[in-house]
Image (spheres, rainbow, N blue to C red):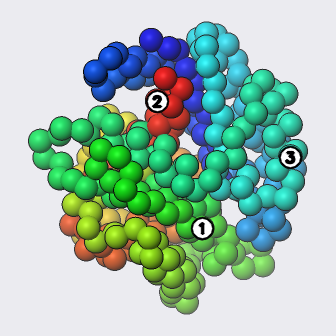
Amino acid sequence: MKRVAAVDCGTNSIRLLVADVTLPDGASGELKELDRRMQIVRLGQGVDRTGRLAPEALERTFAACREYAAVIKDLGAEHVRFVATSASRDAENRADFVRGVVDILGVEPEVITGDQEAEFSFTGATKELTGHPHIELPYLVVDIGGGSTEFVLGSDTVRAARSVDVGCVRMTERHLLHDGRITDPPTAAQIAAIKADIAAALDRVEETVPLTEAATLVGLAGSVTTVAAIAQGLDHYDSAAIHHSRISRATVREVTERLLTSTHAERAAIPVMHPGRVDVIAAGALVLLSIMDRIDADEVVVSEHDILDGIAWSLA
């Protein structure tokens, strides 16, 4: 058994998982969660436009890192791995980010490729689905992040993967900003522009990933789990109710249309809505719906376990 700490720093949020991981000979192993937490720091603020990490975004991220360092120390994790994804891949000043993380946590953030990100997501999402009586293979694991979306097709192992720069923050900043303010609600033209971007990205994905061969769609990350929570009408965010829930395409469409036609105040009033997702959730939901339409998926299996769990497994 190893006590490990995994940090996933994406475009919109930074998350921590501290867990005891056991990998006995000849068995699939066990991951016992000790602490899991998330902060929305919007590290990718403006990166699509400027190519740089904003000073205020870096400071928000470093403040979260200081909190996580205290948790890791208190729980006595022996091994720490810090993975940074889309925003820090794209930024010219990522060296500033690296130095700050090393100073606080004592480990260098690994700015991983999209393919590596996809593999971690696949492992984290599917390891506990193995042998499930009502899950057909192969899986298509879709991780809708802030800056990018990862697509991974596989059964026991990854067969094909692709990362494209279509995420909830990137689509919001690219298409819904006007004079520095987010259009609320978006216009038909803005929605059409997002759909066109997503469609073009899906065309690129299909060059290497046979999307329509998937038997089970597994959706990961905050946009997907928030859509699932809204679909279930939860009055508070309930991870146990969301994990491995199945949401029909018709319901995803209803939730997406609701989000695209609501105001900031109306979205903020949804009980399960995290304040940091209010402005970007409509674009994230539209990404999910577009994927389901493209592959003609009847439903999405929602997983609370994702790249963070995959990073923890890698430390074993």
152 lies above or below 19: below
Q: Badge 3: how crowded within 10 Å, few (<14), some, or many (20+)?
A: few
Q: Which mark is residue 95?
A: 3
What's the residue at 58%, 30% (across, down)? Answer: 6
Viewer can see residue 64: yes
Direction from residue 256 to residue 277 in the image, left or right: right
Viewer can see residue 269: no
Picture coordinates of residue 252 (x, y %)?
32, 65
Direction from residue 195 to residue 76 in the image, left or right: right
283 lies above or below 91: below
Pointer 1: what residue?
165
| Residue at mark 1 to residue at mark 2: CA–CA distance | 26 Å
Pointer 2: what residue?
313
Say what secondary structure mark 2 lies in. Answer: helix
Comparing 125 with 176, the one in front is: 125
Res. 54 image quadrant? bottom right
Say what secondary structure mark 1 lies in. Answer: loop
237 lies above or below 29: below
- The amino acid beneath tag 3 is Ala
Comparing 308 with 261, the one in front is: 308
Comparing 167 with 77, the one in front is: 77
- The amino acid beneath tag 1 is Asp
What's the residue at 50%, 14% (across, down)? Answer: 2
| Quarter of the image where the N terminus is located | top left
Direction from residue 79 to residue 284 in the image, left or right: left
What's the residue at 28%, 22% (across, down)? Answer: 27
First in sequence: mark 1 or mark 2? 1
Say what secondary structure mark 3 lies in. Answer: helix
Disc 1 or disc 2, which is closer to the eye? Answer: 2
First in sequence: mark 3 or mark 2? 3
- The amino acid beneath tag 2 is Trp
| Residue at mark 3 to residue at mark 2: CA–CA distance | 27 Å
